[in-house]
Image (cartoon, rainbow, N blue to C red):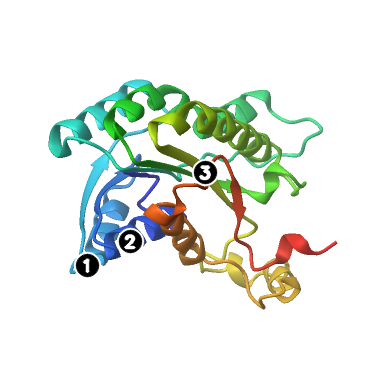
């Protein structure tokens, strides 16, 4: 199951897992056309994809989604949380409601869903991977809501990792800096400057993150627990 999977990083993760032969539940909250487009792009891959509309920030939607997964497949092996909310704002004079909405979108799906996920993944192995951001540890202009949200999410990853480790369920995060999703934003002066500064010579693309998520879902990654793996081409290494 991949949340927020109709666009961006979530879509790339769903495609990468589908290419590995996984049966993917493609969760989305808004655009039916985006979900259909994502599903069409995965046609012919070794796995399968089933789009399901559910807003995982709503407890009742998440419960329905997880229940459907159990009824259809009997268990769940992988849960990737890529859905997010972002209200751009400065830290000084921030809108508390917007910050709370960003935090809720980040942590509520795990807080509400983990009891059911633990049952669906029993007796293991299971993989829970969340998508985070360098904004959890560094300051990014007008990013305070999502920065606080991602910091809370990374903390939650560590707590859940400890409590689920004895069930053979790993919980990890993949973090990155600015992502090149195409379009005008990717060619902006700020994006070009970041690309030039990145040691690997370009901005991160969604497929880079998807590859790391796929690695964390393998059997060989079973001893990686409670970690935040940064995949940014080395950008965060620079002073």
Rounded to the nearest angstrom, the CA distance separating label 3 from label 2 is: 20 Å
Q: Position of residue 234 (x, y in %)?
A: 69, 67
Rounded to the nearest angstrom, the CA distance separating label 1 from label 2 is: 8 Å
In primary-sequence order, the first of circles 3 and 1 is 1
User: Mark 1 — residue?
Assistant: 45
Q: Which mark is residue 15?
A: 2
In primary-sequence order, the first of circles 1 and 2 is 2
Q: Which mark is residue 228?
A: none
Circles 1 and 2: CB atoms closer than 8 Å: yes
User: Image quadrant for the N terminus?
Assistant: top left
User: Mark 3 — residue?
Assistant: 172
* Residue at 52 percent of width and 47 percent of height: 224
Q: Residues within 10 Å of mark 2 (few under 14, many from 20)?
A: many
Circles 3 and 1: CB atoms closer than 8 Å: no
Disc 1, SS: loop
Q: How many marks?
A: 3
In primary-sequence order, the first of circles 3 and 2 is 2
Does 57 appear above or below 77? above
* Residue at 76 percent of width and 47 percent of height: 138
Does 56 appear above or below 4? above
* Residue at 58 percent of width and 61 percent of height: 179
Q: Position of residue 33 (x, y in %)?
A: 27, 53
């Amino acid at each position: 199951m991949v949340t927020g999977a109709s666009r961006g990083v979530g879509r790339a993760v769903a495609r990468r897992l589908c290419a590995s032969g996984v049966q993917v539940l493609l969760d989305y909250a808004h655009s039916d056309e985006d979900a259909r487009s994502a599903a069409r792009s995965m046609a012919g891959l070794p796995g399968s994809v089933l789009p399901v509309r559910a807003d995982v920030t709503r407890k009742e939607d998440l419960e329905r989604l997880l229940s459907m997964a159990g009824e259809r497949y009997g268990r769940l092996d992988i849960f990737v949380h890529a859905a997010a909310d972002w209200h751009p704002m400065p830290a000084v004079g921030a809108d508390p409601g917007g910050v709370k909405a960003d935090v809720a979108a980040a942590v509520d799906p795990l807080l509400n869903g983990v009891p059911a996920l633990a049952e669906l993944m029993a007796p293991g192995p299971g993989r829970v991977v969340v998508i985070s951001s360098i904004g959890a540890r560094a300051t990014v202009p007008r990013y305070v809501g999502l920065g606080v949200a991602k910091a809370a999410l990374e903390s939650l990853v560590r707590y859940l990792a400890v409590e689920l480790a004895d069930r053979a369920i790993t919980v990890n995060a993949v973090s990155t800096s600015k992502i090149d999703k195409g379009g005008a934003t990717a060619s902006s002066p700020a994006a070009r400057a970041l690309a030039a500064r990145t040691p690997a010579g370009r901005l991160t693309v969604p497929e880079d993150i998807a590859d790391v998520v796929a690695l964390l879902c393998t059997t060989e990654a079973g001893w990686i627990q409670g970690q935040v793996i940064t995949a940014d081409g080395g950008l965060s290494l620079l002073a």
